[in-house]
Amino acid sequence: MKKLLFVILACISLFLITSCNSSDDCEGNPQTGNVENQFDNMVGSNNLNREKIVVISDIHLGVDLSFSETVKHLSRIEDFVNEVGNSKTVKELIINGDMLDEWYIPTRTDTYAGGTQEDFVKRIAKSNKAVIDAFNRVIKEGKVKVTYVPGNHDLLIDANKVEAIMPGINQARDTDRSLIGTYHPDGYPQIAIEHGHRYDFFCNLDPFDNQDIAPGSVLPPGYFFARIAANSFVNQVPKSEATKVADLQITPTNLSQKALYLYHYGWKSCLNDLIWVNDNFNDKIFKTNIDGYTGTLSMNDILPYNDNGTINVKLYKNAFTQENWEKRLAYNNAPVMTNVADAVIGSLLTSFIDNQSNVQYFQNPKSNVRIVIFGHTHIPMIKSFTNVRNEACVYANTGTWIDEKIRDIDAAAGKVVDQDTVNMNFVVVMPHKNDQSEINVGLYKYKRGKHVLVENQNIK
């Protein structure tokens, strides 16, 4: 009897789901039936008009799910995109960088597997088919505008290759720098949405270094960091067996030497305590064949070293003077110059990047922007600022959708992470229901498929 009842209930559920999928009036995820769409019932909105702007970033779709940073959260991304597409009050979904991941590849892996970058992008689309299909459904239906802003992990992937897997997507790219972009949504010139890496020493475009071995390259040093990070989790070793970065026995004597020392300190901190590996630093382990690089490099090609009373480095040797850093910032269309030593250490602490919203926009007298949204740091937040005209301003960071990594040794010791409760943040910008001139910026977590408000701010 119980078995018969279960079969009847299952048939009813299947009928409801398929009926909803065939109706244009259904709301919510088409895989979950006729449920109320959470975007259409948000506190602070009149929930009558199509006026909400939803911003996500750092979903890091990888080419190979055996080492991709996002696996456990893929089904939730699909749910989320479907929910956006089925909303009657969302007008735009913005993917604010690091949608595709060309950086997080183990060092000994040939990134393009003997093929081309175009093949690589198509392989990402195939590996993450359900998510890409969800985006494409929303784009094709045309009710919600979908916009993509380049990040650093997809820095080399040009507009044509993105268009090839997501036809019709809107792309926000600087007019003179197509690999980077800032987006001002329609009707909102006071809002600037960009990934945030253009101010990051480790991650912005660098066309001035390594041209002797990689002509035309713009890859910054963070690219090599990401590949080591992938090694650290694909080929795990106990921390006690890791190859350690030795101290430099030199005291910095000028700004460029200080910047180099801080660069060394950053690598040492990361390799000794965060992404440790047991590779011999002299071994040629970096398979390149990307962006002008053709050789195989070692970790000692990346790391600073003592050199006749100074600090030197083989790769990126031109990057550490103030003059060259400002030249690089200008190439990345950054309006305000920063100190090279501050940028080197600040890029690692991330607070430096978040504060660039204030430096580059709110304290810049040439800027009228009052709301800035970054991704990149993976740390979701909302901060209040006051600009040079004494007006209230808001900075939001959208966080990330990657899985929380657990090392094998920690899993064996019993550590468990409920992946349905970690990361998965997004930002919603919308007019306030009582005053359309007042803008609400809300930071949310997609926890177990529910919208959980973390924090919000209003500005008028």
Image (spheres, grey):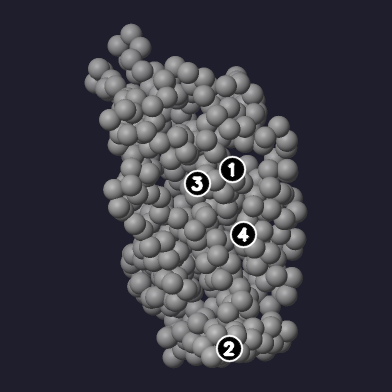
Q: Which residue is mark 3?
A: 198
Q: Estimate the spatial distance between the alpha carbons at disc 3 and disc 2, rounded to whole Å.
A: 61 Å
* SS category of the residue bearing label 3: helix
| Residue to which mark 4 is pinned | 148
Q: Label 2: which residue?
A: 4
Cα distance in 3D space between marks 3 and 4? 16 Å
Mark 1 burial class by Cα count in 10 Å: few <14, some 14-19, many 20+ = many
Counting residues from the start of the chain, the first of labels 1 and 4 encountered is 1
In the picture shown, does residue 45 fall above or below 441? below
Residue 433 locus on image (x, y percent): 46, 89
Q: Is residue 290 left or right of residue 349?
A: right
Residue visible at 34% across and 39% down in the picture: 274
Considering the numbered disc 1 on the image, is that residue within a helix, a strand or a loop?
A: loop
Task: Tell me where residue 451 appears, x and y as whole percent.
Answer: 44, 76
Where 75 falls versus 181 (above or below)? below
Q: Callout 4, which amino acid?
A: Tyr
Of badges 3 and 2, nearer the viewer stands: 2
Give the mark toward the camera: 3 or 4: 4
Along the line of sight, which residue is nearer the eye, 368 or 409? 409
CB contact under 8 Å: marks 4 and 2: no
Q: Which residue is mark 1?
A: 102
Instruction: Give, as a three-letter code, the residue at label 3.
Output: Arg
Amino acid at the residue labelled 2:
Leu
Which quarter of the rendering shows the N terminus?
Answer: bottom right
Quadrant where the C terminus is found in the figure? bottom left
Q: Amino acid at mark 1?
A: Glu
Between the residue at mark 4 and the residue at mark 2, the CA separation in whole angstroms equals: 49 Å
